[in-house]
Structures are given as C-alpha cells and as structure tokens.
Amino acid sequence: MKASGADDGGRPAGSPAPPPPPLEWKFSHVFGERMAGEEVHEVDIISAIEFDKCGDHLATGDRGGRVVLFERTDVTNRGSRKDLEKQDYPISRHPEFRYKTEFQSHEPEFDYLKSLEIEEKINKIKWCQPANHALFLLSTNDKTIKYWKVQERKVKKISEMNVNASIAEQNGNIASSSMNCPSGYLPNGGCSERPCSHLNNELSSPPGGLPSLRLPMVTSQETNPIARCRRIYAHAHDYHINSISNNSDGETFISADDLRINLWNLEISNQSFNIVDVKPANMEDLTEVITSAEFHPTHCNMLAYSSSKGSIRLIDLRQSALCDNHSKMFEERDTPGSRSFFTEIIASISDIKFAKDERHILSRDYMTLKLWDINMESGPVATFQVHEYLRPKLCDLYENDSIFDKFDCCQSGDGLRVATGSYSNLFRVFGCMTGSNEATTLEASKNPMRQQVQTHSRPGRSLSTLTRVVRRGSESPAVDANGNSHDFTTKLLHLAWHPTENLIACAAMNSLYMYYA
C-alpha cells in the first residue's frame, strides 16, 4: 500500500522530479571535413546555422554568401510505427542527414555613396512557413535581406544521342515513312504537286542511310530542388544587420541593426516600419547598441532585444507604433567594486532566444550563459559559466580582438538543457532543470567526448522559486577544460539544437558537425 503523501516514484507529494542523467553524446555526421594541414578559405567558413520548425531540414550560410540545405532521410525511410514494431526495429535511431542543394544567396557589393564595401557573408538564416511542398527561408548579409523559395522541379535529362542501334532503326523507319508522302508540303500550308521522288533527291541521306541518323532523346525526368529569390528587402538599414526573426503570424518579420529595428511584411519589399530607434540626436551621446532581437514564439505582439550593456528589453507592439518605451527590462546589477575596464565589453549580449516554455529567455554574453524569467526583471534565475578560466586572460583577448567574438546559444526541444560554443572548437551543454549539475564539454570532432572531464557544479534550485543559480564547469585559470592551453583561432561560434530531438549541429570553420544523444 502506497504511503500517504507519496507518489508512485516514492517521492513526497509535490516535490520536484529528479533531474535527468547527463546525456551521452555520439558523433553522427560531418560535412566538409577538413583534412590535416588543409588550408581553409575564408569564403568557406560557416557563419549561420538554423533548423526548420519540424527539424527535417537544416540550413547553413557561409562567408562566401552561399546557403547550403540539408535534409533528414531516416524519418521518411523508416516507415510507420506499426511496421517498425513488426520488424522489432527501434523507434529512436541514428539521425541521418544528407546534402540537398545550395545556392548563391548574396554577392559582394559596393556602396558608392558611402564608399563602403558590403560583404556577401550570411549573418542570419530563418526558416518561414512551408507551402505547397516548397520551402521558404530568409537570409541576410550586412545590408540586404532576401526571401527564397526552394521547390522540387522536374528537369528533363537529354541523352547525347540515340546510340542504341534498335532505337536508331526505329527512328530511321519513322523518318522514312514520313518521306513516303503523296505530295510535298510547303510553308504556310501550301502543297507542291511534285512527286516525292523529287523531294527525296533534294534531301540527301547521311552516310550509312537514315538508320545512322542520331536524334536527341529524353531519357528521364529528374526531380531537383531549385532555389528562386522571391523578394529582396533592401535600403532600410544604415548599419549592419545583426538579427532577423519571423513572427508567429506567418506574415511579418523584423530585422535589427545596431540602432534600429524594422518591421516588414513578407509580401511587401519596398516598405518597412521602424518600431525601435535608439539613435540619439547627438551620436556622441550614444552609450549602447542593439545586439540581437527575437520575436516571441506565439505572441505576435511581443518581441525582445538585447543591448551591448547586457540588458534585455521586452516590448509590446500594441502600446505604440514606435516602441521607445519597453514593457520590461531585464538586467543584472553589478556587484560593488567588481567593475573593471572589461566589465562592459564582456557584458555585451551576443544572442538571445526565447525558451521553449515561452516563460524564459536565454542569453549569451562573452563569459556566461544566462536564463531569465519574464516575470523577474532584477536578474537571471540561472547563470552558466562557459569559460571562466579565461577571465585572467581578458587583456590578451582584448589585444587580439577575441573578446569581441559573438557566440550563439540554443536550447533543447524539451527545455531541459542549453548549449553554447567556446574556443578550441569546444561547446558546452548544461542541464537547466531543478537540481541538475550537468555541465558537459564536447569537442567538434569525430570523437566529441575527447575533451570530456568530470565537472562539478552547485546543485540547482527550482526556477519556480525565482532563485538565482550559478552553474560552473572547470575553472582552471590558465588552461582549458582538458588541461591544455587554449587556441583562440579555432572558435565554435555557431550551433543549433534540433527542435524535437537531442541532436546538435555546430560549425567548426568550414566543417558542419552533428551529434546525437
């Protein structure tokens, strides 16, 4: 008989569920693997990664302005659940992706009015709602956003010639029969009364006779994905675009640069509405810039944007046309006496994401990953130290400009874990559930656990208690998580988590690595 006040698992009623065990990550795929000693061209370095909403497609953009699409194959090929049960086939299996297509999204340009070169590098990619078996996505460089449609189209494949003798004989017979006509036909429907023999004399046969005449043949109709640019949204940003985000209404999206956020309609490319403008009347009074912006996943009237001062502002589009005033502002107060020359630089937020539960916001600054509760503006509810061992090296990082690197962040589909990148092609996975001490270090290679060390962290407390949690990994002041000196030239800036499964795609220079658990 079950004791009173306890659930089926033996826990007291109302107590939080225990955190799941740490995931064991395994290598899945690598595309564009770099051989030892192979030189990497600047244009081939990956600069953006994005899964679509269902996770069946993955898009990457590079510094050469190209967009490469990958599609998942094991979902469509494995059959129904009932068939798998009959075959005793496991439901969860190794995820398989393959190359689908690629296209040139942006070309290098030159702004003659400002004497400014515009790079072709892809800054962001966002998937839009698919329709009629076609895929739609937005891609942007520093100045121009493009709306792409990718659809499977039948392409006729023509053989060189009918080299088959039997086919050639048939073609010859057809040609011969067409010559056995009672009268010769002239242009515009005229008819000649001259005998066919006269026409045959004028049309000289090829050497070997009519059977040797070669005609092009349609051998097959292949289906290939074709990318076509539907819209170009240009001339709306004076500064470099750092973010684009789709609205949940499926009709609009935002684009953000250092000082402004614009609202677009997907069907209207020559007009946008400025909804946030932080540019002061005197540029000498400028104290912060916009670093990232994101629409709420379900509320089409809400969006959040981050700043170089480490704050996040939540705005409501229903309040006014120009959202100069925010609804909420999330900011962590400085500890007295802790400020230094680098404090404001490392506080700058490089990426924000709304959590899957729609109640939290995930942000990444240079040193940490933070989780914020929308209902609590005074500070983050959890802080994850990504590479605290670099703090004594901030002066060196400033000298080589590494301190200005912008790292992405992402969250798992179940909302239990978060991930972000670091140096030496490492990335970190943290558990964010109550009581979790998961802090895994992985390397972007075919052996991801090579850099794995046992890390200890403070036991987390429930997010519902609105109590701040600090989670740390290895904190050696001079070495990385594996005891090796750090390589600042190999940095893992971009990664994405599959929306429904434990699958992470990350970019190491020109190589795309995938890992599953």
Image (cartoon, grey):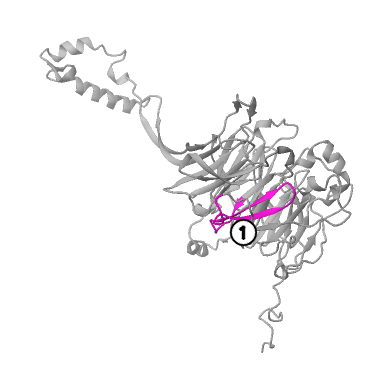
Which image quadrant for residue 164? top left
| Residue 188 screen position, x and y as percent | 17, 19
Residue 186 colored in magenta in the image: no
| Residue 359 screen position, x and y as percent | 63, 63
As drawn, which residue projects farthest toward the front?
281
| Residue 151 screen position, x and y as percent | 45, 42
Image quarter of the C terminus: bottom right
Q: Is residue 308 left or right of residue 505?
A: right
Residue 79 higher or lower than 185, as above or below: below
Number of numbered discs: 1
Q: Is residue 460 left or right of residue 292?
A: right
| Residue 239 screen position, x and y as percent | 64, 36
Near-viewer residue (493 or 302): 302
Q: Is residue 251 left or right of residue 184?
A: right
Circle 1 sits in a helix, a strand or a loop, which is it?
Answer: loop
| Amino acid found under the numbered disc labelled 1 | Gly
From which residue to which does the magenta span run?
A: 294-321
Residue 30 visible to an observer of this rendering: yes
* Residue depicted at x 86% and y 53%: 475
Kindly identify which residue carries mark 1.
Answer: 413
* Residue depicted at x 20% and y 23%: 177
Q: Residues within 10 Å of mark 1 (few under 14, many from 20)?
A: some
Near-viewer residue (91 or 223): 223
* Residue depicted at x 63% and y 62%: 414
Which image quadrant for residue 2? bottom right
Residue 505 visible to an observer of this rendering: no
Image quarter of the N terminus: bottom right
As drawn, which residue projects farthest toward the left?
193
Residue 313 colored in magenta in the image: yes
Q: Is residue 227 left or right of residue 359?
A: left
